[in-house]
Amino acid sequence: MEPVRTCIGCRSRAPRSSLLRVVAQHTSVVADTSAVLPGRGAWLHPTLECFRLAQRRRAFGRALRVSGELDTSDVENRLNG
């Protein structure tokens, strides 16, 4: 049975393989494509819609337990292609 995670954008549950793990490094959020970077991770559907929902809900800071502003441009650029 494959592990299930919750998307921080739309809050729906999905298999881990269909989600993108993101991790906070200093003051920025980076995409962890291999899911091995150290630190607390959060899971997000790899779509701009879920990314925008997570930004609007301020979910990155809460999920990653980081206070202050986070730079999410790395993840946004990756999703834009």
Image (cartoon, rainbow, N blue to C red):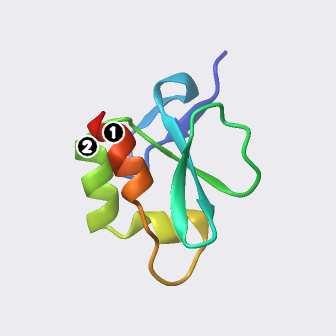
Percent coordinates x, y for residue 79 in the rendering: 33, 39
Percent coordinates x, y for residue 6 in the rendering: 49, 43
State whether residue 54 is above or below residue 34. Answer: below
Of the 4 image quadrants, the one containing the C terminus is top left
Q: Number of numbered discs present? A: 2
Query: Is residue 10 at all visible to an observer of this figure?
Result: no
**Mark 2 residue element:** helix
Point 46% across, 72% down: residue: 70
Percent coordinates x, y for residue 34 in the rendering: 65, 31
State whether residue 27 is above or below residue 8. Answer: below
Percent coordinates x, y for residue 30 in the rendering: 53, 52
Labelled disc at residue 55: none
Q: Is residue 21 left or right of residue 50?
A: right
Say which residue label 1 marks: 79
Mark 2 or 1, nearer chain start: 2
State whether residue 44 is above or below residue 23. Answer: above
Q: Name the residue type under label 2.
A: Leu
**Mark 1 residue element:** helix
Residue 64 vs residue 79, the one in the foreground: 79
Q: Is residue 7 left or right of residue 51?
A: right
Q: Name the residue type under label 1.
A: Leu
Characterize the local packing of mark 2: few (<14), some (14-19) or many (20 or more) Cα atoms within 10 angstroms.
some
Residue 46 appears in which quarter of the rendering?
A: top left
Labelled disc at residue 48: 2
